[in-house]
Amino acid sequence: MQNIQTMIDQHGGFEAVRTRYLRLENPPFMRLVIEVIGGPYPNGAYELSIAHYSEQNGDAMRDPEITFLVVPSAESTIWTPLTYENSYLGAYQVVAEVSREGLIKVKQSQWMKELRSFAKQWDRNIKQQGFMEVFERQYGDQNGSSLWS
């Protein structure tokens, strides 16, 4: 989730997103919302929700939403999928749970592997669909550097 991570970093980091979630409107694509929904845990991890939203009969519909446990480190940030939801399909899957300490307990290893692969493609699609440019226009430069440097 490199592109999502870049937006979070440019927005001021996880604590900034925790207090000011990101909502990116990019027609004709569904709205993209990036939220911190848990943490920080003792190990410095956060839970994040990344979702495309639309509406049906006045209800918010996710297509999809993936929640992640995100563990920052000096070398790289590790994104581990926890849940997947697609409201239109009535699909909700828990692939892992998080302990109070921020440790992961995998419940479905095969689905986690597939979800990791899906998330990598989704992240590439987010960039190709122009959400990085929308972020730059909408939120500007929060930390004195550009997404493109």
Image (cartoon, rainbow, N blue to C red):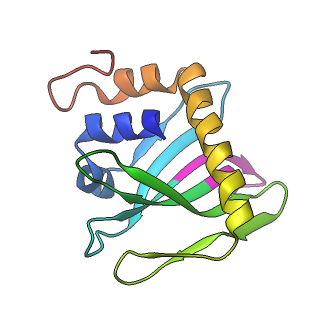
Any magenta on residue 62? yes
- In the image, 140 versus 96, the foreground residue is 96
Does residue 14 appear left or right of residue 104 in this picture?
left
Seen at 73% across and 62% down, the residue is 110
- The magenta stretch spans which residues? 50-65
Q: Is residue 61 visible?
A: no
- Residue 133: name its quadrant: top left
The single residue placed furthest to the right in the displayed view is 89
Question: x%, y% of residue 67?
Answer: 54, 60
Quadrant assignment for the C terminus: top left
The single residue placed furthest to the left in the displayed view is 144
Magenta segment, prevailing SS (helix, strand or loop)? strand
Question: x%, y% of residue 88?
Answer: 82, 54
- In the image, 63 versus 4, the foreground residue is 4
Does residue 139 appear left or right of residue 105 in this picture?
left
Seen at 35% across and 23% down, the residue is 136
- Residue 54: name its quadrant: top right
Question: x%, y% of residue 94?
Answer: 67, 71
Q: Is residue 78 visible?
A: yes
Does residue 62 appear left or right of residue 40 in this picture?
right
- Residue 146: name its quadrant: top left
Does residue 84 appear left or right of residue 104 in this picture?
right
